[in-house]
Image (cartoon, rainbow, N blue to C red):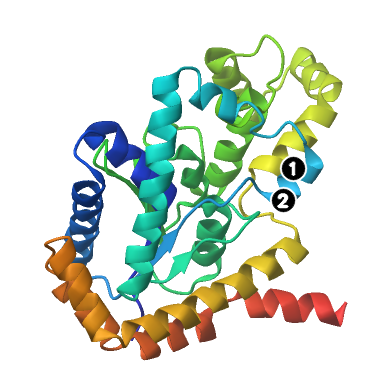
Amino acid sequence: MSNRILIYDGSNTVIRFCSTMGSAGKAKIISAMLNGIRAEVNNRNINFVIMAFDHGSSEFRKKLFPEYKAQRKAQREKTPADVKATELRYEIINEFIEVCRTIGLPVFYSYGIEADDLISFAATYSADPVTIISTDKDFLQLVSERITVYSPVKQIEYKPRTILKDLPYLKPSELKAYLVMTKVILGDKSDNLPNIPKIGEVKAAGLLERFFTKKLTDDDRKLFLEHKDLLQLNRQLVDLTQLPLDFQDKIFKELLKCLKIALEFSKNSEKIESISEKYTLNLNWVKAINSDLLTTIKRFISTLTYSKVVEGEEKQ
């Protein structure tokens, strides 16, 4: 029997709830987030949940591009009110991580690895159906017949056909390349990634359509050639399925650690009950998942195709 996997972008979740419930207090925000997870688990008949959180910027991206996300702190803390809001958000993240860990949910939180990296790793190498919960559009490049992305804000479930309906000239097999190339060309201000100069969304859309319909002009080819270094750098930074193998190996080892910790905590029914009482929560869904967590984790690990990648690399 296959697992039905839900992977939460934990950092994204906290930011969303803090922006709408910032004055409600930590306990109510955490309770609301867990109730949101419960709803998704019950509605989707999920038997395995992974929580992924950012812990510093990606190590390998910082090495490639030291300016990666360098502007974030300044943008977050323009005023004393911004500083206070940021401090509260970090307090909630830390408490939310502790709560999720205590009730037995696998929590991935490892310095130098972004939530994006773990989520892409687990979703890509899993053999089972995966739903990613996040408003981050970067995850759309992972969408396939097996992987979907759900945006709680837009309430849209992104599947290949959801995205392709607005791109009639694109083949399903070209979808990932299209989404990656879009960000490679346009860059990303939120990540401090540069774009091709004087190319905005409209021009990029036209350029991409000509590329995928094999109608590039001489000026298009010249543009790509002039900015090949920038395009190559951005591709390395934004393609979530092309992480360096040594970095993937680190993710894999940290993932195994967080699964082991989840197994240990899932057996402590007293602590789970204490969380239920403290935050006034119905955690029957957690108990149902925990009742067969060992079997679930064994299947998840045994069916990860990452081991085949590692074996292939060792043979070379």
- Residue at image position (50%, 71%) is 126
- Residue at image position (76%, 31%) is 231
Where on the picture, by quarter, is residue 199?
Answer: top right
- Residue at numbered disc 2: 59
Q: Does residue 213 show up? A: no
Rate crowding at label 2 as few (under 14), some (14 to 19) or many (20 or more) other CA atoms within 10 Å. some
- Residue at numbered disc 1: 62
Q: Amino acid at mark 2?
A: Glu
Where on the picture, by quarter, is residue 184?
Answer: top right
Q: Nearer the viewer, residue 25 or 113?
A: 25
Q: Amino acid at mark 1?
A: Lys
Q: Does residue 283 show up? A: yes
Does dot 1 land on a helix, a strand or a loop? helix
Residue 130 in the image, given as x and y percentages of width and height: 39, 64
- Residue at image position (34%, 85%) is 293
Total numbered labels placed on residues in the image:
2
For residue 241, above or below residue 303:
above
Q: What quarter of the picture does the C terminus occupy?
A: bottom right
Mark 2 and mark 1 in contact? Answer it, CB < 8 Å: yes
User: Relative to residue 222, is residue 153 drawn left or right?
Assistant: left
For residue 110, above or below residue 222:
below
